[in-house]
Amino acid sequence: MGDSFFSEYFYRVLHISAIIFFFAGFGGAMLSEKDSKLNKIITGIASLFILVGGMGLILTALGIRHTESWPGFLHAKVTIWAILTIGAPILAKRLKKGRVAVFYGFLILGVMAVYLAVNKPF
Ligand code: HEM
């Protein structure tokens, strides 16, 4: 499909690997007493790589170019990504009660993004 310097396989591995790093890092921050600076940095970079991988997959897996419009599920995935990326550091720092419940709630949001990627319902 769309021509790109990196292959579809590269972007797919990057996308899914970054998702592992993001949720592991966020889980660590939410479920431990004190977050470390290094973990904050790794979680932030992982979030960026989720987006980079996703953008690469839009071209290489779906063959959608810059000038073409996106199917609805991609807008939903970017929205989920933004909620996770903005919400994670704020909640990790400020949330006092219900940290475990909110963490698993965020995992459910991630599961919704997986569902959208696999089924593309709209
Ligand atoms: C935390 C958020 C996200 C999660 C958990 C997630 C999850 C996944 C997973 C598991 C796949 C692989 C599906 C498969 O190989 O069958 C995938 C593919 C994909 N994702 Fe994401 N994703 C997220 C965010 C994004 C974002 C922000 C974008 C767009 C910029 C995006 C665009 C794509 C595309 C285009 C594919 C390829 C679909 C295909 O091969 O048919 N994803 N995503």
Image: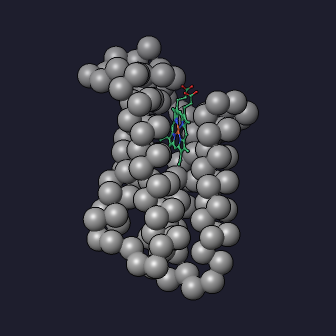
* Residue 70 location (% of width, % of height): 55, 34
Name the residue rendered at 39%, 74% in the picture. Answer: 35
Q: Nearer the viewer, residue 31 or 76?
A: 31
Residue at the far top in the pictured view: 1
Tell me: 60 left or right of 116.
left
Tell me: 77 left or right of 55.
right
Q: The C terminus lies in which quarter of the figure?
A: top right
Q: Nearer the viewer, residue 86 or 70?
A: 86
Q: Is residue 67 above or below residue 32?
A: above
Q: Is residue 79 above or below residue 4?
A: below
Please tell me in which quadrant of the rendered image residue 119 appears. Answer: top right
Q: The N terminus lies in which quarter of the figure?
A: top left
Tell me: 74 left or right of 122.
left
Q: Nearer the viewer, residue 66 or 2?
A: 2
Tell me: 73 left or right of 81.
right
* Residue 117 location (% of width, % of height): 61, 34
Q: Is residue 44 above or below residue 94?
A: above
